[in-house]
Every structure is written in structure tokens, then in C-alpha cells.
Image (cartoon, grey):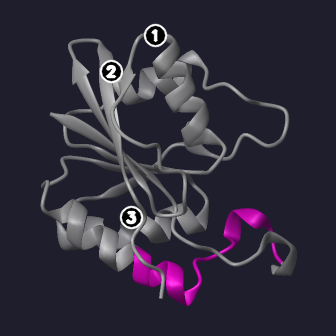
Amino acid sequence: MPLYLVRHAKAGSRSDFDGDDVDRPLTASGRKQAVDLCARLAAVSPSVVVSSPYRRCIETVEPLAIATDTTCSTDDRLAEFGSNHVRADATIIGLLLDLPDRSVVCSHGDVIPAIIDSLTDTGMNIVGEPQWGKGSVWVLEREDDRFVSAHAWPPPSDD
């Protein structure tokens, strides 16, 4: 069974937000994307929903957690890296490997490519075209203690 790695839906511009970036919310179109993601991901009956502690990530998967009567927990390892990190370290990969099948994990546009790069370095095969847009979902297939293949769903429309 797969694990689902979600890039948060559309949020307002970082430069246009006056508060701490951790608190930046989804835009109206991002909230629509979250509802659309909820509809698609609810069909897989997620066992666990885990998010970066950033508000925009939580808001992306909250509708799913509510719809499936699942608690949305947060994990600091899924937070944005910032400009000085380009690789997912063993603690992030360990988090993913420790999660049960059908888990949904929400993170950021710098973290997800780092995870995918790290997993392909260990032999994971990517099937189809990569999707990196806000609201995209990577479906990671696991065998025992490693991820063996991945394919990506394009983001839902934001209009």
C-alpha cells in the first residue's frame, strides 16, 4: 500500500504576508484545492495524516482529516528547509518509513523534491512525469523497509 506525499495548496505570497511565515494561510483558491484533494484522498481511507507545522500545510490536509475522522498531527521534520538545505536527511526518510500504509503527509516545495531525490538515490523508480505544483501528490510505493516506486498526481485546479 502506498504513502501519499502532498505539497501544500496555494498560499498567498510570502512577501505580501505581514506575519510570521509559519502562519501564512491558504488563499481562497488554495482552500478549493484542499477540498478537491480531500475528495480524492478520502477515497484511499488514510490511516494517518501528518503535516508540517506551517499553517498552509495544516489547512491543506485538515479537510481530509475531518472527512475521514482522522487526527492531523504535525511533525517539525516536515517544515521548510530554508535556503541552506537541498537533501532530505535520514530523519525525514525514517519518518516516512515509520508511518503506516495509506498515510498522507503534507509538506513544502523545497522538502518534497529533496525527499524524492533522496529516495531515487536509494533506488526508487519514478514512473511518469514528475509533478511539483502546489497541491500535487506523490504516491510512494513501499516494499518492506524501502520505497521502490513513485508516481505523481497533478495538482487540482485552483480556479
The Cα atoms of the two marked residues, 3 and 1, are separated by 28 Å
Q: SS for tag 3?
A: helix
Residue density around tag 1, few if under 14, some if 14–19, many if 20 or more, within 10 Å: few
Per the image, the residue denoted by label 2 is: 147
Quarter containing the N terminus: top left
Q: Nearer the viewer, residue 77 or 117?
A: 117
Residue 40 position, x and y percent, is 22, 66
Residue at x 59% of width, y 51% of height = 108
Residues at badges 2 and 3 in contact (C-beta under 8 Å)? no
Residue 142 position, x and y percent, is 24, 23
Left or right, 7 with respect to 39, comes to: right
- Image vertical order of residue 70 relative to residue 140, above or below: below
The segment highlighted magenta reads 19-33
Q: Nearer the viewer, residue 77 or 145?
A: 145
Residue 77 position, x and y percent, is 58, 36
Q: Amino acid at mark 1?
A: Thr
Q: Amino acid at mark 3?
A: Val
Q: Main secondary structure of the magenta part?
A: helix
Residues at badges 2 and 1 in contact (C-beta under 8 Å)? yes
Viewer-nearest of discs 3 and 1: 1
Q: SS for tag 2?
A: strand
Q: Amino acid at mark 2?
A: Phe
Per the image, the residue denoted by label 3 is: 61
Asked whether residue 31 is drawn in magenta, I would say: yes
Judged from this view, the residue extending furthest toward the front is 128
Q: SS for tag 1?
A: loop
Asked whether residue 38 is drawn in magenta, I would say: no
Per the image, the residue denoted by label 1 is: 122
